[in-house]
Amino acid sequence: MTSQIDAIRTAILEGAPAEDLASLPLPESTRAAVILAEEQEMFAGMASEDKDPRQSVHIQDVALPEIAPDEAVIAVMASSINFNTVWTSIFEPVSTFGFLKRLGKESAWGARHDQPFHVMGSDASGVVLRVGSAVRNWKPGDRVTVHCNYVDDQDPTSHDDSMLSTNQRIWGFETNYGGLADLSIVKANQLMPKPEHLTWEESAVNALCNSTSYRMIVSKNGAGMSQGQAVLIWGATGGIGAYATQYVLNGGGTPVGVVSSPERAALLNEMGCEAVIDRRAEDYKFWKDDNTQDQKEWLRLGKKIRSLVGRDVDIVFEHPGRQTMGASVFVAKRGGTIITCAATSGFMIEYDNRYLWMNLKTLKGCHFANYREAYEANRLVCEGKIHPTLSRVLPLEQTADAALLVHRNEVEGKVGVLALAPTEGLGVANPEMRERLLPQITLYRRFNG
């Protein structure tokens, strides 16, 4: 297997033509970052913060199954860590092996995913090596990024908005053979062009977070922000928050970024966000105790927002969940929108419904993006209008360490993972564009030293 993988890597690095890549033999297995079904109870009874991905994530070879007619095999040059990678690694809120078993019951092709291992990872950049017989728009040699919306195009519920599909899944979280591997299997409708001014690792960190923020802020399926609207962004320098900040600025809006340190406030300022709230300096305590929220703190937050932008916000970009949702519903303007995705501080949320219904506000759920939205978000990266938020890069064999960094919130932005790319800095095909945009591309690397 090693010699075959080395041949694939060498061919890609040397720019081999498509016919050469298509003729290279594929190994029967691939190196991958996995969790194991036999260990899914290993953290039972432990607090979330005490669960260590270094105990559960393993690097091992796994067999590659036959690809379906609508799928492709990609050589993964780089991947990245998302919160769902952390959740997978610590078996929260549930073990992902339940997802794989349900997928395995749907069809013969689905049965390939029901394994005693789970290859993680919901982002990737790389090169197409093989395509199934039904794939039309992609071929071996194409340089691609991968988004994580995994849908069945024969399901009628997927054809208005595929995120409403009854069997919509997230690749590498609710499916097997994700991006944290040397080789991965994806559906053809997950593929998008690689931004040619970016490296492999810079290209790999965008799809999940960027597409999610695009849908939440820009799309009609999300908040549909208009020019001049004010948007409160929790965690405005984090994974999805940093892309949200860019979309608000690009769309002629006014971001009000919430961060937790003077350094992160300075980073926001460098991104172009002038209205910044340092929540630690303000010492907001939205909860008096585990069961009681403090409306005076909501009022204090609203007053701070008005002091910065002169009015209440039209949109709240909400993802912390339990700790902030009561405040988010309160501070949105009359008729405003709270758009929510995830709940990193707790899924069981509380808010005072009087401020929602009597002020005609909208609380709207949002989850990743459909193919059209992901493709448009990727196009904006390709055009240099949205930039990666890459902070750190580790090799595939240190995937567990990378997951721990995200689990402990020890980095700002995204953590990239090198798979077949032997070093950082490779894969750039448009150096002139890169040179012009280098300060924006490298902002997060400079911030994290």
Image (tube, rainbow, N blue to C red):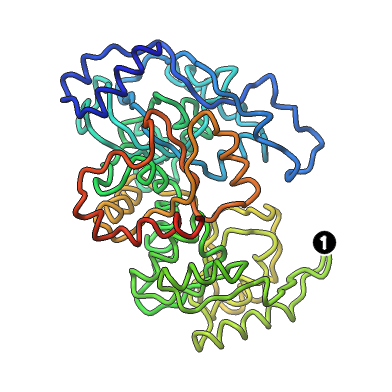
- For badge 1, the amino acid type reads Asp
Q: How many marks?
A: 1
Point 53% across, 69% down: residue: 316
Residue 407 sits in quarter: top right
Point 49% across, 72% down: residue: 315
- Crowding at label 1, few (<14), some or many (≥20) Cα neighbours within 10 Å? few
In the foreground, 209 or 24: 24
Question: Does residue 362 appear in the picture of this structure?
Answer: no
Residue 229, given in percent of the width and then of the height, sits at: 42, 77
Residue 423 sits in quarter: top left
Q: Which residue is mark 1?
A: 290
Question: Does residue 336 appear in the picture of this structure?
Answer: yes
Depicted 276 relative to depicted 310: above or below: above
Point 68% across, 82% down: residue: 299
Quick check: 111 left or right of 210?
right
Quick check: 143 left or right of 43?
left
Point 78% across, 32% down: residue: 44
Residue 177, given in percent of the width and then of the height, sits at: 46, 25
* SS at badge 1: loop
Residue 14, given in percent of the width and then of the height, sits at: 22, 27
Quick check: 344 left or right of 121?
right
